[in-house]
Image: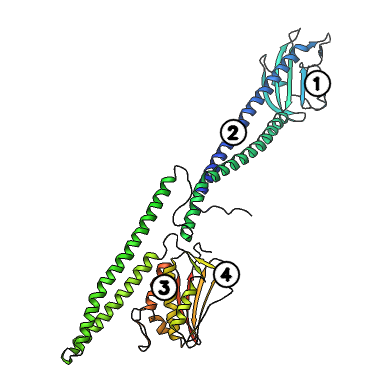
Amino acid sequence: MSRPLPPFGSLRLRFMLAIGLWVSLGILGIWFTATQVFSRHIEESYHEELEVHVRELARLTEIGPDGVPMLSRPLSDPRYEVPLSGFYWQVSIPDRTTLKSESMTRGELDQRVAHSPDIAHVVEDGPTGPAITYGMIEEGPAGEEVHIVIATDQSELDNAIASFTRELTVWLVALAGLLLATGLAIISFGLRPLNRLGIAINRLRGGSASRLEGSYPAEITPLVSDLNAYIAQTSALVERGKVQAGNLAHSLRTPLAVVTDEAERLSENSQCADSARVLLEQSERMQQQIDYQLARARSAAMAKLPGSMSVLPTLARPILQAMTRLHPDIRFTAPTNAGEISLPVDPVVLSELLSILLDNAGKWAREEVQLSYTRDPAGAVTITIADDGPGMTEEQIARACDIGTRFDPATPGSGLGLAIAREICADLGCEFELTSKEGGLVARLTFANNGGK
């Protein structure tokens, strides 16, 4: 299974691009420099060799009694004796017979290349294609000009350079592949601590750990230590916030209960009945706000504390038992053969959310409330609570989560349940949806894939 490409902007991708660029530039630089050096070296070698052969040919050339040139012995390089081998020589005297190498079975070399006692060279057409031609003039016994010419096919030099270039390219490509593989191995090894840090953070988010665990290099250890200190400080702040919220609620409820009690006494007096009714209404609103804000503060603080984990159906069992006692006429059911599903949320907060929704469903159900939960292939978890009650209209669903909303004053409740449930869902990062079906209402909670199992 192939490893997916790293996302754009990742350290791994940046290192890979940097190594790829550096290796490419290095290999191209080596290839260009090596081919240039080799080409220059082999060209100089060819030219030196031809100069030597020109001088050797001049030294071996003799003029016979009839004025015809001849060699005292063959040249030392046997390639001049192989027909059309690409290595040729020619000795000529104007208006006399021209002496050619055995290799030159056709064509001839331009004697005009040899125009001075100094060796000169040109590239011209030879018997088998473009040839590097060297020539010089020697003075014969009778003062005649003897033109000494040596030629080698340009293709000999080009083939040698091309062969070297091909072999060099193969080796450099192999070297580039080895360097890239080594670079990727170094990147993987160097970034392994960051991968372990990412796994530790996912464990923290998933609720299976309460702090970042493991040992890390010296460069990362300060970051891990600071994060662990921050997590501990945040957890302590949350705990203090819970205590302070409880203290504040308690300190408000006591004087509020006194005000409510006095308002009820005043309501018995006909002269103060109207004022007492106003006080009772305002006291009730104050109580609603205290309960709502307290529940909101508690869920916001505890929703996703590090190390928190809720497991279904274990979490739901005591809640369903409590609902059965609270609503003895209603049957509360849940799947018995479903596997366990873990959610990285605080179990107290999730218990409160399920209690609110199950209690609300139990108040309106005729006979049964069904609790179900599933996880889709993408990892999202859906919890569904369905009742067989009268359901709601679209207008009622739109207002159901408003604070203090009660559609039937005769039904017990404060009108805060669904409002608190909506706020808890917002704190947990899950989607809360109410839909009316034929013969009941469905509350659906959807948790995106966030590290649970």
Disc 1 marks which amino acid?
Pro
Residue that badge 3 annotates: 352
Q: Secondary structure at mark 4?
A: loop
Is disc 2 in contact with disc 1, using a CB cutoff of under 8 Å? no
**Mark 1 to mark 3 CA distance (whole Å):** 102 Å
In the rendered structure, which disc, 1 or 3, sits on the residue that comes first in sequence?
1
Which circle, 4 or 2, is nearer the viewer? 4
Q: In this picture, is 217 found above or below 212? A: above
Which circle, 2 or 1, is nearer the viewer? 2
Q: Is residue 301 left or right of residue 39?
A: left
Quarter the N terminus occupies: bottom right
Q: Which mark is residue 78?
A: 1
In the rendered structure, which disc, 4 or 1, sits on the residue that comes first in sequence?
1
Q: In this picture, is 402 found above or below 345? A: below
Residue that badge 4 annotates: 339
Is disc 4 in contact with disc 2, using a CB cutoff of under 8 Å? no
| Place of residue 224 in the rendered image (x, y in percent of width and height, measured from the top left) | 43, 49
**Mark 2 to mark 1 CA distance (whole Å):** 36 Å
Q: Residue at x 73, y 19 (%)?
A: 149
Residue that badge 2 annotates: 30
Which circle, 2 or 3, is nearer the viewer? 3
Q: Quadrant of residue 363?
A: bottom left
Q: Residues within 10 Å of mark 2 (few under 14, many from 20)?
A: some
Q: In this picture, is 93 found above or below 141? A: below
| Place of residue 437 in the rendered image (x, y in percent of width and height, measured from the top left) | 50, 84
In the rendered structure, which disc, 3 or 4, sits on the residue that comes first in sequence?
4
Which residue is nearer to you in this view: 20 or 71? 20
* Residue 110 in view of the camera: no
Q: Secondary structure at mark 2?
A: helix
